Image (cartoon, rainbow, N blue to C red):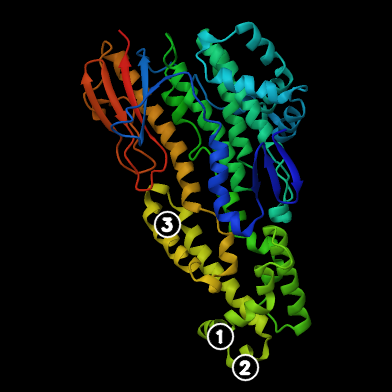
C-alpha cells in the first residue's frame, strides 16, 4: 500500500512524508497533497504539444474529431451510473474490499510497469504482458463495479480524531485508478467504446465517492480521479462513431465534487483539536483549570508539530505565550464588551486564550465565507483575505497560534473550479461536434452560431471561452487566464474529420 500510517497524523506516500497534523506545515499540506493527488494526471492518449518558446503557461491539446449529432434519446449516455440501476447499500465497504484485493507479490514492480505503460501509446504496448498484469486486477475491478451499483457512500471515519484521523487506502485507490485507466485506454484504442464508457462511469463515481470523505484531502483525491477520467474522454470522442456526450457532461452534478462538508470540518478543526476552547468565555476558570488547558494545548501542539520538549516553541508555551499576548488580550476583550472586572478576575492565560480563539474565528470566517460563492466571483475577495492573513502571520511571536491551522483555501477552491472548467470545455467541444454534424462537417465561425444547445462559459473566470476558427474544419478553443492561474491552461486545437 502506498499509504502506511507511521503514527497518528502521519502518512507515508512512498518517498514523501506528509504530516497531516503539523501546525507549522498544515497551511502547506494542501498544496503538497495537491501535487500528490494531481500526480494521477499523467499522459492520456491524446496528442499534446506545446511551444515552450512562446508560452509556457498553456498546454496545447490536439483533437481530430468526427462530427456527432445529439443522441436520440438525448440522455442515452451517462458518465455516472444510473440511479435506477443501483441498489441500496454502502459503496465504501466495496471500495475497502477493492483495496484489500490489490494484487499481492512485487507490487512496486507492478506499479512501475503500469506507470511506464501509461506513458506509451497503446500501439507500442506488449499486449500479452499488459493484459496479464491487468488480469491480476480483476478482483479489484469487480469490487469497483459493484460499488458503482450502490446508491450511497459512507466512509464512517472518526472525525473526532482530528489531525490524528487515519486516511486509509487513498494511495491504493490511486494505483487502482491507474490500472483502470490503462484498461480503458486499450478498450478505446480497440473501439470497444461501450466498455470504455462503463469504466468511465465506475471511475468517475469512485472519484465522487472518495470526495465524500470528511477532509479536504479526500476532496482533492476525488477531483484528481475525476479529472483523469474526463481527460480520457478526449480520446474516446476522437474515435469513429463515438457518441456525442454533450448531455452526458451537462447532466453531471454541479459541482461534480461537493466540498461543503469537508470545508465545514476544516473550519471547525480548531475545536476538534482543542474542545476546551469552545466555551472558554462562559465562566471564570480557576488557575488549576487554565493550567490543565494550557498543558493540553502545549502537549497537543508538540504532538502535531513534532517539536521536542526543549524546543523554543515549547519553552514559549504557556508562560511565554501569556507574557507576549496578555496586554493585547486585555485591550481586545475590552473592545468586545468584557467588563474590566471580568478581565481582571480571570487568569491571564484564560484572557489570552479567549483573545487568540476569537481572533482566529474572525480570521477563519473572513476566509471560509468566500467558499459559499462560486470561484469566479469569490476569487478577488479571497485573495484580499489571504493577503490580510499573511500580514497577521508576519507578526513574529505575536502571530495568532491557531491561524496556522488554516489551509490554503483559494488553491482548494481553484482546483474545484478547474475540474468544472474541464467539464465545460468538453461540453463546448461536443456542441461544436453537434454543429458540424448538422452543417456538412463545417464548424461554427463563432460559438454564438451554435443555437441547438447552450455553450457554457468558463467556471474559473466567468468569461466566455476564447474561440477562433482558422478554416471551415479547424479551430482553437482556449480557456481564459485566471488571475491566479498556477497550472497550464488548456488550449484545444480542433480538427473535424472529413
Decide which of 99, 114 is in the foreground and name it: 114
Q: Tell me the SS state at disc 1.
A: helix
- Callout 2 environment at 10 Å: few (<14), some (14 to 19), or many (20+)? few
Residue 382, numbered label: 3
Q: Please provide percent x and percent y for residue 43.
A: 49, 24
Mark 3 touching mark 2, by CB under 8 A? no
Write down the quadrant of residue 438 in the picture: top left
3D distance between C-alphas at marks 3 and 2: 39 Å
- Relative to residue 76, is residue 59 depicted above or below? below
Residue 341, numbered label: 2
Write down the quadrant of residue 359 in the picture: bottom right
3D distance between C-alphas at marks 3 and 1: 31 Å
From the viewer's perspective, is 311 left or right of 332?
right
Q: Which callout, 3 or 1, points to the residue nearer the camera?
A: 1
Disc 1 marks which residue? 327
Q: Which callout, 1 or 2, points to the residue nearer the camera?
A: 1
Q: Earlier in the sequence, mark 3 or mark 2?
A: 2
Q: Earlier in the sequence, mark 1 or mark 2?
A: 1
Q: Residue at x 54, y 42 (%)?
A: 34
Amino acid at each position: 500500500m502506498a499509504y502506511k500510517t507511521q503514527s497518528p497524523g502521519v502518512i507515508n506516500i512512498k518517498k514523501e512524508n506528509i504530516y497531516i497534523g503539523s501546525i507549522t506545515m498544515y497551511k502547506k499540506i494542501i498544496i503538497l497533497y495537491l501535487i500528490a493527488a494531481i500526480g494521477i494526471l499523467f499522459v492520456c492518449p491524446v496528442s499534446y504539444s506545446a511551444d515552450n518558446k512562446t508560452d509556457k503557461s498553456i498546454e496545447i491539446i490536439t483533437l481530430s474529431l468526427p462530427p456527432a449529432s445529439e443522441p436520440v434519446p438525448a440522455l442515452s449516455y451517462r458518465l455516472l451510473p444510473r440511479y435506477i440501476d443501483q441498489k441500496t447499500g454502502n459503496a465504501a465497504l466495496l471500495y475497502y474490499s477493492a483495496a484489500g484485493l490489490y494484487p499481492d507479490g512485487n507490487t512496486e514492480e507492478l506499479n512501475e510497469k503500469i506507470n511506464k505503460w501509461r506513458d506509451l501509446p497503446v500501439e507500442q504496448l506488449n499486449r500479452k504482458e499488459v493484459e496479464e498484469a491487468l488480469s491480476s486486477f480483476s478482483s479489484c475491478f469487480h469490487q469497483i463495479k459493484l460499488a458503482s451499483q450502490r446508491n450511497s457512500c459512507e466512509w464512517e471515519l472518526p472525525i473526532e480524531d482530528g489531525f490524528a484521523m487515519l486516511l486509509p487506502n487513498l494511495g491504493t485507490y490511486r494505483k487502482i485508478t491507474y490500472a483502470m485507466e490503462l484498461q480503458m485506454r486499450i478498450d478505446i484504442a480497440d473501439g470497444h467504446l461501450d466498455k470504455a464508457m462503463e469504466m468511465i462511469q465506475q471511475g468517475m463515481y469512485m472519484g465522487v465517492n472518495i470526495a465524500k470523505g470528511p477532509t479536504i484531502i479526500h476532496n482533492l483525491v476525488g477531483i484528481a480521479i475525476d479529472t483523469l477520467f474526463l481527460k480520457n474522454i478526449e480520446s474516446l470522442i476522437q474515435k469513429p462513431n463515438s457518441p456525442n456526450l454533450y448531455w452526458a457532461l451537462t447532466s453531471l452534478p454541479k459541482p461534480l465534487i461537493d466540498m461543503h462538508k469537508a470545508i465545514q470540518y476544516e473550519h471547525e478543526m480548531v475545536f476538534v483539536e482543542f474542545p476546551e476552547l469552545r466555551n472558554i468565555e462562559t465562566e471564570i476558570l480557576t488557575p488549576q483549570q487554565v493550567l490543565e488547558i494550557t498543558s493540553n494545548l502545549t502537549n497537543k501542539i508538540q504532538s502535531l508539530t513534532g517539536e521536542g520538549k526543549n524546543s523554543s516553541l515549547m519553552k514559549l508555551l504557556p508562560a511565554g505565550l501569556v507574557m507576549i499576548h496578555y496586554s493585547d488580550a486585555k485591550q481586545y476583550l475590552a473592545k468586545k464588551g468584557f467588563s474590566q472586572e471580568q478581565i481582571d478576575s480571570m487568569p491571564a492565560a484564560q484572557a489570552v486564550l479567549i483573545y487568540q480563539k476569537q481572533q482566529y474565528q474572525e480570521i477563519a470566517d473572513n476566509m471560509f465565507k468566500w467558499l459559499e460563492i462560486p470561484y469566479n466571483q469569490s476569487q478577488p475577495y479571497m485573495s484580499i483575505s489571504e493577503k490580510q492573513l499573511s500580514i497577521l502571520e508576519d507578526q513574529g511571536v505575536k502571530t495568532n497560534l491557531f491561524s496556522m491551522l488554516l489551509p490554503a483555501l483559494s488553491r482548494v477552491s481553484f482546483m474545484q473550479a478547474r475540474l468544472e472548467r474541464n467539464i465545460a470545455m468538453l461540453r463546448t467541444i461536443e456542441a461544436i461536434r453537434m454543429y458540424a454534424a448538422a452543417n456538412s462537417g463545417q464548424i461554427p465561425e463563432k460559438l454564438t452560431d451554435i443555437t441547438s444547445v447552450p455553450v457554457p462559459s468558463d467556471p474559473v473566470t466567468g468569461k466566455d471561452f476564447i474561440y477562433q476558427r482558422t478554416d471551415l474544419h479547424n479551430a482553437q478553443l482556449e480557456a481564459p487566464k485566471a488571475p491566479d492561474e498556477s497550472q497550464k491552461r488548456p488550449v484545444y486545437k480542433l480538427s473535424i474529420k472529413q
